[in-house]
Image (cartoon, rainbow, N blue to C red):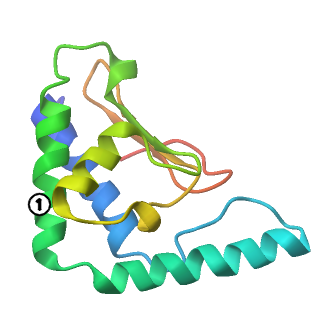
Amino acid sequence: MEQTYEQAVEKTVKWWSQKSFKVSLNQNNGDDSQTGGMAFILMNMLSTQTQGDITEGQIQKFEEKLTEILMNMKEKASYHKSLDVDYHPCIQLCEAADFAGITTMCFPCKTRSYIDEKNKVFAAYQYGGKYLEL
């Protein structure tokens, strides 16, 4: 049975919330050099500190706002229903974080997701992550 768009949105929001606020060491830019190793350590220190400062209330506000944003995209083409972080989060993630009073330092870099035209959710986590159906 196909899932509804609403179910796809819920799955997407929960996935981003979990990867951003609950998973430690969520930063990996794929740079295996010595400088990249230092960047990995610094990025994860900032992310871990940020995660520790976020309240459950802020997470709930983030999830509500991101749900609202994605629901407003229901009738748009599937490429509009994508979320991503290269080194900085996309506007939708930034808007939800700003609404909740959360800094964007905890969003995992090189991470992306999208909802396709059949309401299937696909996501790739961190550098080199392959798209998997959620």
Looking at the picture, how far across and down is residue 60, in whole percent? 11, 65
Q: Which residue corresponds to mark 1?
A: 61
- Is residue 3 in view from this perspective? no
Residue at image location 20% in from the left, 34% down from the top:
70
Looking at the picture, how far across and down is residue 34, in whole percent? 89, 75
Q: Is residue 56 or residue 120 the one in the foreground?
A: 56
| Quadrant where the image shows the N terminus | top left
Residue at image location 33% in from the left, 48% down from the top:
94
In the image: residue 91, left or right of residue 88: left
Residue at image location 79% in from the left, 76% down from the top:
37
In the image: residue 91, left or right of residue 124: left
Residue at image location 20% in from the left, 23% down from the top:
73
Could you say which quadrant of the image residue 122 lies in?
Answer: top left
Could you say which quadrant of the image residue 39 lies in?
Answer: bottom right
Looking at the picture, how far across and down is residue 86, in whole percent? 58, 46
- Is residue 96 in view from this perspective? yes
In the rendered image, the vertical position of residue 30 relative to residue 133, given as above or below: below
In the rendered image, the vertical position of residue 27 relative to residue 1, given as above or below: below
Q: Is residue 42 or residue 15 the one in the foreground?
A: 42
Q: Is residue 117 or residue 100 the one in the foreground?
A: 100
**Numbered disc 1: secondary structure:** helix
Could you say which quadrant of the image residue 127 lies in?
Answer: bottom right
Mark 1 Cα shell of 10 Å, populated few (<14), some (14-19), many (≥20): some
Task: Tell me which amino acid carries mark 1.
Answer: Lys
In the image: residue 127, left or right of residue 112: right
